[in-house]
């Protein structure tokens, strides 16, 4: 049994998220990793993870980018939709530990650290652009503003004593 790395589970989850409808390029995968974890691992670690997962037949190269194999899709499809990211990563890592590689190993993808570094830089430059990221929460106002026209009601008059 080989060692399961955290980067492997993160890469499978991010690739599944980025390549839902079509194969995803490296910039989209880096954006998904940044969204899931908040930071992007080193280029060397990601390059090794691509090689490991493609040798196991879990990540495939397509003409436009990268996508998950049917076995990896099965790992990601049974995850809870509203679960926390840590829980999803734990389940993917658990599924990776029980995954048995097929008899014929495909060629490992050669994604260099330079390609990954260029994709990370392109993702960071896109984040600095003028467009709004709709996934970010809206900032709360410093103090709560009262709406005009809404006033407090007059207090009820004191009841008079009966004679």
Image: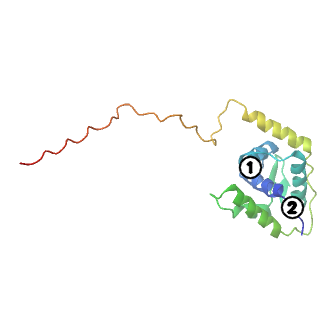
Looking at marks 1 and 2 on the same chain, the residue that comes earlier in the sequence is marked by 1
Q: Residue at x 89, y 70 (%)?
A: 1
Q: Which residue is mark 2?
A: 57
Residue 37's mark? 1
Q: Residue at x 80, y 36 (%)?
A: 122
Image coordinates of residue 162 in percent, x first then y, are 9, 48
Q: Helix, strand or loop at disc 1?
A: helix
Q: Return the residue nearer the eye: 66 or 128.
A: 128
Above or below for 102 versus 157: below
Image coordinates of residue 127 in percent, x first then y, are 73, 35
Direction top: furthest residue: 130
Direction left: furthest residue: 163
Q: Helix, strand or loop at disc 2?
A: loop
Q: Residue at x 47, y 36 (%)?
A: 144
Above or below for 54 versus 39: below
Determine crowd level at label 1: few under 14, some 14-19, many 20+ residues with C-alpha closer than 10 A.
few
């Amino acid at each position: 049994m080989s060692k399961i790395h955290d980067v492997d589970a993160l890469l499978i989850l991010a690739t599944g998220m980025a390549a839902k409808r079509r194969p995803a390029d490296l910039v989209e995968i880096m954006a998904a990793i940044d969204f899931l974890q908040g930071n992007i691992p080193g280029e060397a670690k990601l390059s090794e993870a691509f090689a490991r997962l493609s040798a196991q037949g879990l990540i495939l190269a397509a003409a436009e980018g990268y996508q998950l194999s049917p076995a990896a899709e099965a790992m990601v499809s049974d995850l809870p939709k509203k679960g926390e990211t840590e829980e999803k990563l734990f389940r993917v890592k658990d599924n990776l530990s029980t995954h048995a590689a097929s008899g014929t190993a495909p060629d490992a993808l050669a994604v260099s650290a330079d390609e990954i570094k260029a994709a990370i830089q392109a993702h960071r430059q896109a984040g600095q652009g003028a467009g709004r990221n709709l996934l970010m929460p809206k900032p709360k106002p410093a103090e709560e503003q009262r709406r005009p026209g809404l006033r407090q009601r007059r207090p009820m008059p004191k009841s008079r004593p009966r004679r």
